[in-house]
Structure formats: C-alpha cells, structure tokens
Amino acid sequence: MSQTKILRIDLDEFGKLSKSFRCGNVFVSSEYLKSLEKIKNIESYAIYEKDRLIAGFPVNIIRKGILKIFLNPPFTPYFNIVFESIPSKERERFRFFEASVKSYAGFLKSRFMYYSVSQSPELSDSRHFVWSRAKVSLRYTYYMESSKDALNGVDRMIKNKDIAEASEEYDFEKHYSMLAESYSKRVPISKSDYEILMADLKNHGLIRCFSSKSASVTFLMDRANRTSYVYNICGEDTALLIYSVMKRNLLEGYAVDFLGANTKRISRYKSMFNPQIKSYFNISGIYDIIH
C-alpha cells in the first residue's frame, strides 16, 4: 500500500483542480466555493501519493462547541471529491481508489464528530467508501436534455398550458419570502445569508433567476459541463415556469438537473417532465479514534 498525505490548499488552487479533474462540477468550482465562504466555513484539501497530486476535496465545517461536523452546505447536493484521473483498467483503478478514497474517508472520520456528504453522479463505484467504513446511501436525481424531442415528452398537464411570461429578475428578498412559504418557514438558510450567497453567485455569473406572476425559479449554471441545476424553486405552477424557460431556450441549450428525486411527492412532481433518472450516493460516518 502506497503512502498518501493530505495538505490544505486555497480555494483558487482547488478550483484549478476541479476544472480539469474527474467529477468536477460547478458545486466544487472556486467561484461557487468562494460564494459559500462568505456565509460558511469552507476549506479545501489535496491528496498526494508519492508527491503526485491524485485528488482533492472541499469541506464545510460546522462547529458545535468544541466539536466539528461536516454537512453539505444549503442548496448544494454534490460537495464531492475530485480525481486527477481515473484509470481505465480495473487493476490500476482499484489501486487508485484504494489510495485516494481510503485517505479521504480517513481524513473525514479523524476530523469530524459526524460527517454526511454527497458525491457526484459521475462517480458510480461506492465500494471503496464502504471498505473504508463509511455508510453509503443511494440517492437519485432527474436529468433532462434541453432538446425539442425531450420537451415533446413533457406531460400534457404542463405543455398544453399557455407558455408563461418569464422575466429575468434578481429580487432575492422576494425570493426568500416565497421560499419561506414553500418550506413552511423552515428554509435551511437565514434570510441574510441567503441574500449574501445569491448576490455573490450572481456577481460570479453562476445563476439565472426567472419569475412569472406566481412562481420563481433559480438555475445554477455549470458552463463547463453545459448543465443548469434547478437551484431553488418557489411559488405556484413552478413546473410551467420551468417548462416555459426551457421552451424559450433561455438556458442556452443546457441540460437540466432537477436536483433530487428522493421522496415520492417530489419525484411525482418532477416526473411530469419525463426526465432520465440518475443515481448518486451519500457517505456518512462518525469520529473514529482508530482510523
């Protein structure tokens, strides 16, 4: 077994990794992490094997007195490890994951009293996380290409309605009030933090916000992967607003990740778009004095 080491790196350096490494996405980009850093305690690390950089990962540190826990930041379903490359041959791939994942999992269970973080849908092999004594749970999301054929497959309950007027606007105070109604006053972020986060994401050019008379939807734009994420939605008839935005090609032809299909109610609602189902997994664990 080769020796690995983990060193802290700054967010700019980590962002360079996530642009070229496997499993990179907008949620682990330097711009997104810097926006999160304004409201959360975000750090990033690199994993080395014999002085070769093989992987990197971010953490969101939540302090509870003298204890530290690590959870996905709000509205951030993927906060994953990224890999320099993933070998194509199984023997080399096995050894690569054995080194990188074991080091990553060992770091988490040695630093946090509890951790729970989701990985990228691009990573399908969870075995090495299990073998590193992390609890692995399967999760799902819906994904849809922004093509004419895909839009033709949308349920007639949506597409037979008149296309909604969708204006691009960034009234985050209004959006938060609508979110509070959607979340029954249990929004996973404070109003002030929400406004700070959204304003900074806008400054980085990472979001596009559309509103109709009764609904609002914010898309997080992953330009490197040409994917738009349904970052948050609120109001009434939100499905029509999303369909109208796609129908008008306001997302520049980007595919849409609906960010979650993990409850029956949400899955029923999102399934009206006739999307593809994709799986990803979450890892969790508790502090282990022997790691």
Image (cartoon, grey):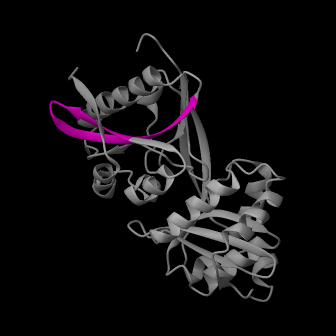
Q: Nearer the viewer, residue 167 or 283?
A: 167
Residue 128 horizontal/vertical position (percent): 41, 29
The quadrant the C terminus occupies is top left
Q: Main secondary structure of the magenta part?
A: strand
- Residue at (58%, 64%) from the top-left corner? 198
Residue 50 horizontal/vertical position (percent): 15, 30
On screen, residue 180 above or below 148: above
- Residue at (31%, 46%) from the top-left corner? 10
The quadrant the N terminus occupies is top left
Q: Is residue 156 left or right of residue 23?
A: right
Q: Nearer the viewer, residue 200 or 261?
A: 200
Counting the numbered discs, the total is 0
Q: Is residue 79 magenta?
A: no
On screen, residue 10 above or below 68: below
Residue 44 horizontal/vertical position (percent): 37, 42
Q: Residue furthest top?
A: 290
On screen, residue 274 above or below 147: above
Q: Nearer the viewer, residue 276 or 5?
A: 5
Task: State which quadrant residue 150 falls in.
Answer: bottom right
Bounds of the magenta segment = 44-63
> Is residue 153 something one can see in this rendering?
no
> Is residue 168 something one can see in this rendering?
yes
On screen, residue 161 above or below 172: below
Q: Is residue 57 magenta?
A: yes
Q: Is residue 54 left or right of residue 173?
A: left
Residue 131 horizontal/vertical position (percent): 43, 22
